[in-house]
């Protein structure tokens, strides 16, 4: 085992893995729903990093946990709004493909 | 149980949850079918909940399952269901199209920040610290209604605004009066 691999590093690397997967997904997905899934992955990574930083460093413990709870609340609000936006876009364009939903020509 | 054995078991658990996160995340971003991608996301969410448990934050693990697995994934499932086209499942993406410039750029977009941050995380790692005692629910509640009361109230306003916005966006006028 590499000496630098203490639990804090391990948890932060897991959070970074989530961020990288989310970035890859949001770049390569063409549908809005696929992008939403990738955003949820990244938000989860943020929550994991926050909790790891709060639990395994001298930082205030409740701060990180409450922060993660707020991130979860924001993610729920964001998912609600994005669902409504996807519905509106789908009603208007008949597709949720991000490449096809443009009204400008050229 | 011995301290050393507990330590070993914690690493085993970490590996297991990391595997869940990796497999689920790959399914979430690579799967051609959006329903399978959502199943991958749910697997990942369970993995993250397990990591919260490993860090001795059981309340957060519970909230993770309740909010993400229970609510957010159902919302995403509704989004998949309601954007179904006559040709078939919503957003079935062509796998062959993914090989090429776009996939290369996507890998670049993911790896650039990942490599930079991974180097920083490993190089600047602070000394390992023993896990602190569990934060009780009462302590969390006191924190949320004490110093964090403004954030607590604001998140309620945000949720209300999001709900009202979703209703307004989804509202359909009656046709033909």
Image (cartoon, helix red, strand yellow):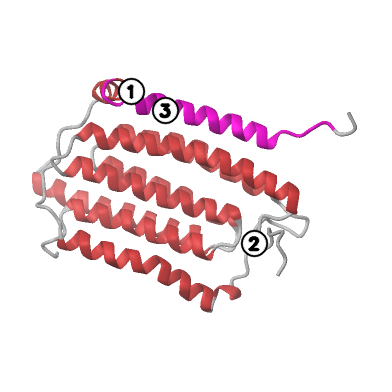
Chain letter of the residue carrying label 2: B
Q: Say whether mark 1 and mark 2 are on the same chain.
A: yes
Q: Which mark is residue B92?
A: 2
Disc 2 or 1, which lies upstream in sequence? Answer: 2
In the image, residue B113 lies at what x, y percent? 34, 64
Kindly state the secondary structure of the residue where label 1 is placed: helix
- Which region is colored magenta? B146-174
Disc 2 or 3, which lies upstream in sequence? Answer: 2
Image quarter (top left, top right, bottom left or bottom right) of the N terminus of chain B: top left
Q: Residues within 10 Å of mark 3 (few under 14, many from 20)?
A: few
Magenta span: predominant SS is helix
Q: CA distance from mark 2 to mark 3?
A: 38 Å
Single out the mark in the foreground, 2 or 1. 1
Chain letter of the residue carrying label 3: B
Image quarter (top left, top right, bottom left or bottom right) of the C terminus of chain B: top right
Single out the mark in the foreground, 2 or 3. 3
Q: Residue B165 magenta-drawn?
A: yes
Residue tagged 3 = B154
Q: Residue furthest bottom?
A: B100
In the image, residue B42 lies at what x, y percent? 47, 48
Q: Which mark is residue B149?
A: 1
Q: Residue A33 magenta-drawn?
A: no
Q: Residues within 10 Å of mark 2 (few under 14, many from 20)?
A: some
Q: Quadrant of residue A70?
A: top left
Q: Say whether mark 3 and mark 2 are on the same chain.
A: yes
């Amino acid at each position: 085992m590499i000496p630098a691999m203490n639990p804090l590093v391990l948890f932060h690397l897991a959070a970074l893995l989530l961020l990288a997967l989310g970035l890859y997904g949001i770049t390569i997905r063409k549908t809005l729903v696929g992008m939403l899934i990738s955003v949820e992955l990244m938000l989860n990574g943020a929550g994991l990093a926050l909790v790891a930083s709060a639990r395994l460093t001298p930082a205030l413990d409740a701060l990180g946990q409450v922060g993660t709870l707020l991130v979860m609340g924001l993610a729920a609000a964001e998912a609600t709004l994005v669902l409504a936006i996807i519905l509106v876009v789908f009603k208007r364009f008949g597709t949720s493909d991000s490449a096809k939903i443009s009204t400008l020509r050229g | 149980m011995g301290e050393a054995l507990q330590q070993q078991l914690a690493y085993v658990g970490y590996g297991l949850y990391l595997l869940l996160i990796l497999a689920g995340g790959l399914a979430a971003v690579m799967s051609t079918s959006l329903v399978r991608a959502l199943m991958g996301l749910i697997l990942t969410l369970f993995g993250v909940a397990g990591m919260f448990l490993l860090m001795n934050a059981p309340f957060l693990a519970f909230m993770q399952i309740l909010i993400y697995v229970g609510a957010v994934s159902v919302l995403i499932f509704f989004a998949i269901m309601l954007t179904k086209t006559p040709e078939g499942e919503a957003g079935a993406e062509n796998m062959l199209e993914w090989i090429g410039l776009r996939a290369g750029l996507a890998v670049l977009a993911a790896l650039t920040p990942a490599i930079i941050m991974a180097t920083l995380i490993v190089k600047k790692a602070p000394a390992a610290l023993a896990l602190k005692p569990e934060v009780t629910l009462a302590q969390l509640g006191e924190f949320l209604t004490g110093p964090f009361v403004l954030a607590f109230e604001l998140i309620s306003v945000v949720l209300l605004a999001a709900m009202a916005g979703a209703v307004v966006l989804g509202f359909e006028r009656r046709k033909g009066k």
